[in-house]
């Protein structure tokens, strides 16, 4: 029972942090960024497009997340593209 409550709390906190991240990206880009894209996913996308901001941001973000996860920005981008963050009912609609 306690383990389930802790797991539920972690999931909820993760959702809140992701929402803050997405909001921060939209604010930083003055509304030009996608409201569903995290800063990490945007950094990977921009670097793969050859944009200087991506070449600067991606290594910094990956270094910050390295103790938790390798290749954080790439994984974030792949998660966005695959729709992994979507509820199951939405994911079922992706061809």
Image (cartoon, grey):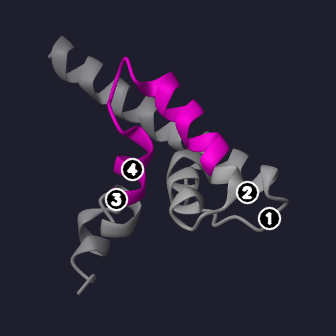
Work out whether 68 lies above or below 43.
Answer: above
* Residue behind mark 4: 74
* Residue behind mark 3: 78
Residue 47 falls within the magenta-colored stretch: no
Residue 67 falls within the magenta-colored stretch: yes
Q: Position of residue 86 (x, y in %)?
A: 35, 62
Give me the disc on residue 31. 1
Residue found 43% across the figure and 34% down from its top: 14
For the residues bearing labels 1 and 3, Cβ distance under 8 angstroms: no
Nearer the viewer's eye, disc 2 or disc 4?
Answer: 4
Give the magenta part as a residue range: 55-78
Marks 2/3: CA–CA distance: 19 Å
Does dot 2 land on a helix, a strand or a loop? helix
Q: Earlier in the sequence, mark 2 or mark 3?
A: 2
Name the side, left or right, on which 9 lies relative to 41: left
**Viewer-closest of 65 and 19:** 65
Instruction: Choose top left, top right, bottom left or bottom right for residue 84.
Output: bottom left
For the residues bearing labels 4 and 3, Cβ distance under 8 angstroms: yes
């Amino acid at each position: 029972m306690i383990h389930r409550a802790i797991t539920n709390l972690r999931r909820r906190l993760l959702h809140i942090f992701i929402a803050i991240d997405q909001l921060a990206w939209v604010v930083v880009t003055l509304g030009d960024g996608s409201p569903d894209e995290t800063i990490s996913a945007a950094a990977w996308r921009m670097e793969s497009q050859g944009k200087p901001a991506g070449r600067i941001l991606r290594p910094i973000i990956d270094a910050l997340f390295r103790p938790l996860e390798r290749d954080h920005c790439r994984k974030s981008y792949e998660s966005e593209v695959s729709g992994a963050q979507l509820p199951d009912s939405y994911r079922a609609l992706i061809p």
